[in-house]
Image: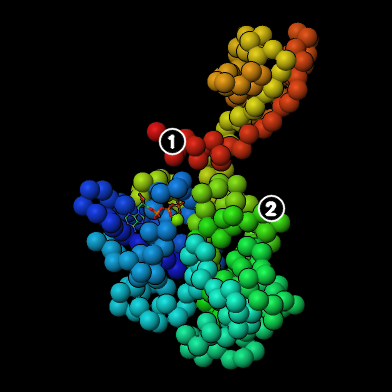
Amino acid sequence: MSQLIVKTEKLNFSYSKSKKDIDSLDLEVPKGSIYGFLGPNGSGKTTTIRLLLGLLNKNSGNVKVFEKPFADHRIDTLSKIGALIENPSLYNHLSAKQNLRIASTYRANINKDRIDEVLETVNLLHVKNKKVKTFSLGMKQRLGLAIALLSKPELLILDEPTNGLDPKGIIEMRELIKKLNKEGITIFISSHLLSEIEKTCTHVGIIREGKMLFQDTVKALTASQSDRLQIELETDDKYRTYDQLIKMGFETKKIAHEEHLLMVSVKEKSQIPVLVDSLRKNNIGIYQVTIKNNLEELFLNLTEN
Ligand SMILES: Nc1ncnc2c1ncn2[C@@H]1O[C@H](COP(=O)(O)OP(=O)(O)OP(=O)(O)O)[C@@H](O)[C@H]1O
Ligand SMILES: [Mg+2]
């Protein structure tokens, strides 16, 4: 088994006596991975990250980072971690470069060239002298990442780095994360969007109400769902379509409050043309056939109820 950069055992934490916010969490982040920490709002992602960084004190359990107990090697460990939690705190009236200069004074052994290096990495070198207040959200987020990269971290912890970004900003951040990972940095990234995790990550942990529901490779997660495919079908007659598909033996559900939509479960893609042909033979007009993301379904199954 590969080396684990982060390992927690039965990690527990509560903000108040009334509920467990992190509940016996076993987290395993392999070296070299892009680990996606996935969960709905309020599931405990940021709290877990704060516990990993020692910004909150656990109630019980173990946290090992770089194979050493965090509590005993705090300073050494933190010097090897770059973190971006929620929105970065930046000085808006100063330039990107000035922000990095200030950040570098809080860190040991950062030479002058490193500032230009990280600006180049996050593609902000050409605007290094512009004031941060003129930056887009995506540029600010990338500057936050540049700050996290200053000390050449081995582990990068990013809390919802694409939150609030437009599609272009999201793609830029995604590409950047992949590039940094190729350069050898292990990346722990939280998100409430499965599609984000699926596109970027090698590993996934799904959390709900402070409990880990699933943890494995993204491949394993996909494979665990691959025996069934969910199809969303839009036709001109939902009820006749439903009757026809049931007659053919397909597991079919009408989508409530949708005039034309049905969900159909098929075993493999080759069943789709069979289904379409039979509907056409019955003069049912087909507007749309969409293969629904299986992971999305699983995520909903795991996180609802
Ligand atoms: N400072 C705090 N004091 C008390 N309760 C808190 C505090 N911060 C978070 N919580 C509670 O802890 C639980 C986990 O919150 P957390 O912020 O870790 O979730 P999250 O997964 O990061 O959510 P989001 O996707 O909204 O960022 C929630 O029930 C939240 O209300
Ligand atoms: Mg959060």
Q: Please identify the residue farthest to the front as the structure is shown.
A: 93
Which quadrant of the structure image shows residue 61? bottom left
**Mark 1 in CB contact with mark 2 (< 8 angstroms):** no
Residue 188: x percent and y percent?
50, 62
Number of marks drawn: 2
Residue 231: x percent and y percent?
64, 28
Q: Is mark 2 within 8 Å of ligand 1?
A: no
Residue occupying image coordinates x 65% and y 14%:
238
Q: Which mark is residue 304?
A: 1
Looking at the image, is mark 1 or mark 2 nearer the viewer? Answer: 2
Q: On the image, numbered disc 2 is attached to which residue?
A: 167
Q: Does residue 172 show up?
A: yes
Residue 59: x percent and y percent?
24, 61
Marks 1 and 2, how far apart at CA = 27 Å
Residue occupying image coordinates x 69% and y 53%:
167
From the viewer's perspective, tell me whether residue 103 is left or right of residue 240.
Answer: left
Q: How is the image coloured?
A: rainbow
Residue occupying image coordinates x 22% and y 48%:
18
Question: Residue type at mark 1?
Answer: Glu
Secondary structure under the numbered disc 2 in the rendered image? helix
Question: Residue type at mark 2?
Answer: Pro
Which quadrant of the structure image shows residue 177? bottom right
Image: 194 above or below 15: above
Residue occupying image coordinates x 55% and y 20%:
256
Secondary structure under the numbered disc 1 in the rendered image? loop
Circle 1 crowding by C-alpha within 10 Å: few under 14, some 14–19, many from 20: few
Circle 2 crowding by C-alpha within 10 Å: few under 14, some 14–19, many from 20: few
Q: Residue 214 carries which label?
A: none
Image: 258 above or below 25: above
From the viewer's perspective, tell me whether residue 295 is left or right of residue 72.
Answer: right
Sequence-wise first label, 1 or 2: 2
Quarter in which the C terminus is drawn: top left
